[in-house]
């Protein structure tokens, strides 16, 4: 899936919530802390990591997220 980033960055746990991959911020933080999120090929353990355009994430085995900048028309 693609996520259009409207700001400079979004914190990782907020991204998981915005995409409805979790029910709560607490659940998002647990998923990150337990090592289920891979960012650009490396496990990301920082729940407040700044996710920027160009980042590619995977959550578990099922979900792949490509972060893209919002295109201005």
Image (spheres, rainbow, N blue to C red):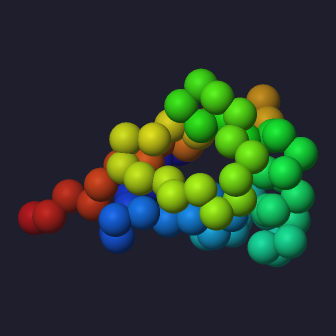
Compare residues 3 and 40 and report the one nearer the observer.
40
Question: Does the rendering let one see residue 12?
Answer: yes
Compare residues 28 and 72 and report the one nearer the observer.
28
* In this view, 27 is above or below 52: below
Image quarter for residue 42?
top right
Residue at 59% of width from left, 25% of height from top?
41
Residue at 71% of width from left, 59% of height from top?
47
Q: Quick check: 58 left or right of 2?
A: right
Question: Does the rendering let one see residue 62?
Answer: no
Tally the numbered discs: 0
Q: Quick check: 7 left or right of 12?
A: left
Q: Quick check: 30 left or right of 25?
A: right
Residue at 69% of width from left, 42% of height from top?
44
* Residue 24, image x, y percentages: 82, 74
Residue furthest left as drawn: 73
* In this view, 27 is above or below 64: below
Image quarter for residue 6?
bottom left
* Residue 9, image x, y percentages: 42, 63
* Residue 60, image x, y percentages: 79, 36
* In this view, 36 is above or below 33: above
Compare residues 42 and 1 and report the one nearer the observer.
42
Image quadrant where one finds the C terminus: bottom left
Compare residues 12 and 1 and report the one nearer the observer.
12
* Residue 53, image x, y percentages: 36, 49
* In this view, 69 is above or below 39: below
Residue at 86% of width from left, 71% of height from top?
26
Image quarter for residue 62?
top right
């Amino acid at each position: 899936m693609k996520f259009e980033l409207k700001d400079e960055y979004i914190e990782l746990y907020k991204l998981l919530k915005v995409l409805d991959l979790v029910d709560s911020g607490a659940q998002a933080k647990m998923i990150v802390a337990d090592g289920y999120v891979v960012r650009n090929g490396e496990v990301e353990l920082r729940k407040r990591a700044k996710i920027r355009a160009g980042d590619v994430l995977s959550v578990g085995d099922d979900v792949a997220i490509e972060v893209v900048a919002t295109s201005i028309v």
